[in-house]
Image: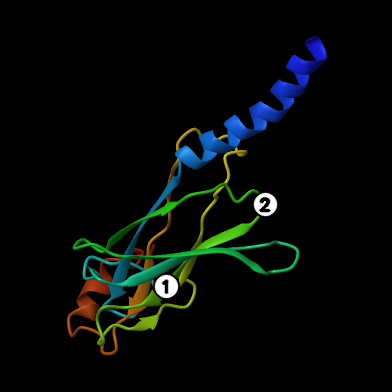
Amino acid sequence: MAKLLLLFALCLLPAIATAQLAANPFLVTGKIYCDTCRCGYETTASKYLPGSLVKIVCKDRDTSRVTYEVEGVTDSTGTYNILVQSDHGDDACDAVLVKSSDPECSTPNSGRDKARVILTRNNGMVSDARFVNAMGFSQNVPLASCPQILQKYQEAED
């Protein structure tokens, strides 16, 4: 009888654990902005891009084969919220810019066109929420006010 209970427990516990993981998806959240001054980072002149397309891509670290992909769209504040239904263990997962909603601001900023996101529960994080660094597109023509705006970001000389 004890062996039967042990066998039952060994078969049932993994199923319960798997069901629990599927019941608690990750919520990946981030923002997409337009770099209106073409400086490579957010400024007070940056605007957020509603209706832009972003995707989460996970790849096997050994083979670089895509193991998971899901897309999302930014809301009126330029924020995306994408549900990821499963734990991706050792996979390398990134949020990646796909398409800007603004044709005048559609070139992905180099270095700000993707952001790493950890999609595993085996890392000490308690929450299922994952917050991703902001990603941006460059505006085709910088704003005329950019020199004055960027002066605020320069360090004072000694």
Label 1: which residue? 97
Give coordinates of residue 82: x percent, y percent.
Answer: 38, 56
Question: Distance from label 1 to label 2 (Cα)?
Answer: 22 Å
- The quarter of the image holding the N terminus is top right
Residue 22 marker: none
Q: Secondary structure at mark 2?
A: loop
Is residue 101 left or right of 62 when viewed as pictured? left
The answer to whether residue 125 is visible is no
Q: Write the residue at 58% across / 30% down.
A: 16
21 or 30: nearer the viewer: 21
First in sequence: mark 1 vs mark 2 = 2
- The quarter of the image holding the C terminus is bottom left
Q: Write the residue at 46% across / 38% down.
A: 23
Is residue 140 left or right of 110 when viewed as pictured? left
The answer to whether residue 110 is visible is yes
Give coordinates of residue 113: x percent, y percent.
Answer: 45, 73
Give coordinates of residue 85: x percent, y percent.
Answer: 48, 49
Label 2: which residue? 90
Position above or below: 25 against 82: above
Q: Write the residue at 42% across / 77% down.
A: 109
9 or 85: nearer the viewer: 9
Q: Secondary structure at mark 1?
A: strand
Is residue 120 left or right of 107 when viewed as pictured? right
Q: Residue furthest right?
A: 3
